[in-house]
Amino acid sequence: MRSRLLEATFAAFTQEGKSAPDIGDIVSCAQVARGTFYLHFQTLEQALQALVQQQSDEMTRACLPLYDMLQEPCQRFAVGCRLFLMRATADPQWASFMIRAAPLDNKQLMAGYMREDLKQGRAMGQFNYADDHVALDIELSTLVAGIGSLGKGVPNPESYMDECIRMALRGLGCDPDRSEQSLLFSRKHLHGWTWVREGKSGPRFEY
């Protein structure tokens, strides 16, 4: 039943035309009594946090085989960004959830990927900025905006992804040559991989 309620929460937060989902929307979608919701969650925020954690775990499992072996912070940052942008292109419903949920959950879905890469890149001189917290907030906001645009559809998704990653790297104080090298590396590294939502292995990137 808990998983059913989380599925309903996801559906409520990605429903077009619904500006602020509430518990009533979730129990209606799940086709359960309101009391059933409170057996599993005390508040809507608690259900959303559980869903965010579920989505985070899902994305982590999908990304690690393509991301975790990389050593260079700039390359890790570029590849991590591109993986999220690629999923947004292939999975508009998930992109819609990201836009709706990110302001409420402090962007937990992506922060774990980015925080350490920024710190390591700054320590190695690949990034040049003054404050880790500010850098993380700005880069996450940029990525969320990119996810939203790609989920809604842009004329040339690949070009949009390239420019989003390029501007994000330059915003971190990464020099132009390294920015371009990291961007091109991410494109080559992930060439041929696509997001697959269904299947026995669960949601994943597949070659």
Image (cartoon, rainbow, N blue to C red):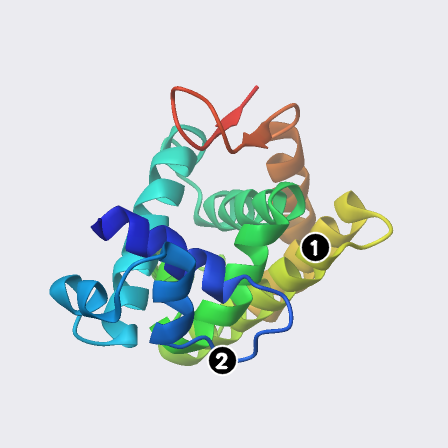
Q: Which mark is residue 55?
A: none
The residue tagged with tag 2: helix, strand or loop? Answer: loop
Quarter holding the C terminus? top right
Amino acid type, mark 1? Leu
Residue 11 visible in the shown view: yes
Residue position for label 1: 150
Residue 23 image offset from top left, x and y in percent: 34, 74
Residue 199 as seen in the image, left or right of residue 151: left
Residue drawn where x is 34% and y is 35% of the image: 61
Residue drawn where x is 54% and y is 61% of the image: 14
Residue position for label 2: 20
Residue drawn where x is 44% and y is 69% of the image: 101
Residue drawn where x is 39% and y is 19% of the image: 200
Residue 202 image offset from top left, x and y in percent: 40, 28
Q: CA distance from mark 2 to mark 1?
A: 22 Å
In-front residue for pair 54/206: 54
Contact check, label 2 and label 1, Cβ < 8 Å:
no
In-front residue for pair 94/187: 94
Amino acid type, mark 2? Ala
